[in-house]
């Protein structure tokens, strides 16, 4: 399936609304992206877990000029902070709509896209009514 910009995406139906995060075995803190240590208590007792990635837009901006050559052809694009239902705040791209239609508090859901280098990256899109 092609998404905005010609990027390939996995079929949504094959991906639960989960994102992979680190959970600390010492203080139970979640972190994204996953890390080998807990940013809250610095413990190395962390494990990768899947949590519900649905959430709402906390804040966003439109990037009009890519900071490096690798991003120049992608501008303009949206960057947002998403507050997930599990209490985690994720820095991500919002795809499928322009910044003029984004709203703080708007419900969003995770989506996985394959970039030009073949890496699968986490992005978000507007959540469809359930």
Image (cartoon, grey):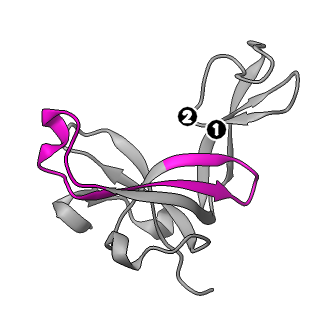
Distance from the alpha carbon under mark 1 to that under mark 2: 6 Å
Measuring 39% from the left and 65% from the top, which residue is drawn there? 11
Q: Secondary structure at mark 1?
A: strand
Of residues 45 and 67, the one nearer the viewer is 67
Q: Do labels 1 and 2 touch, CB within 8 Å?
A: yes
The answer, for residue 2, to whether it is visible in the render is: no
The magenta stretch spans which residues? Answer: 63-91
- The residue at the point 78 percent across, 13 percent down is 43
Q: In which image quadrant can residue 1 be found?
A: bottom left
Residue 37's place in the image compared with 48, above or below, is above
Residue 70 lies, with reference to residue 125, above or below; the image says above
Residue 15 in percent (x, y) is at: 52, 60
Q: Which mark is residue 33?
A: 2
Left or right placement of residue 84 versus residue 119 in this view = right
Residue at 63% x, 86% y: name it.
Answer: 130
Q: Position of residue 19 (x, y in %)?
A: 59, 49
Q: Secondary structure at mark 2?
A: loop
Per the image, is 55 magenta? no
Would residue 74 be counted in the magenta stretch? yes
Q: Nearer the viewer, residue 95 or 50?
A: 95
* Tag 1 residue: 21
- Residue 95 appears in which quarter of the rendering? bottom left
Instruction: Give above or below for 42 relative to 73.
Output: above
Query: How far from the left and from the top, in percent, is residue 46?
Result: 74, 22
Q: Quadrant of residue 86?
A: bottom right
Q: Give the crowd class for mark 2: few <14, some 14-19, many >=20 residues within 10 Å.
A: few
């Amino acid at each position: 399936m092609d998404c905005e910009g010609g990027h390939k995406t996995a079929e949504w139906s094959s991906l639960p609304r989960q994102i992979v995060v680190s959970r600390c075995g010492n203080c139970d803190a979640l972190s994204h992206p996953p890390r080998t240590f807990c940013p809250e208590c610095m413990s190395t007792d962390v494990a990768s877990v899947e949590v519900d990635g649905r959430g709402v837009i906390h804040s966003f901006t439109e990037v009009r000029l890519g900071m490096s050559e690798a991003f120049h052809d992608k501008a303009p694009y949206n960057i947002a902070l998403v507050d997930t239902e599990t209490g985690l705040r994720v820095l991500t791209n919002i795809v499928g709509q322009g910044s003029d239609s984004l709203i703080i508090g708007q419900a969003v859901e995770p989506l996985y896209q394959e970039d030009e280098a073949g890496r699968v990256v986490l992005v978000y899109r507007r959540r469809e009514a359930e």
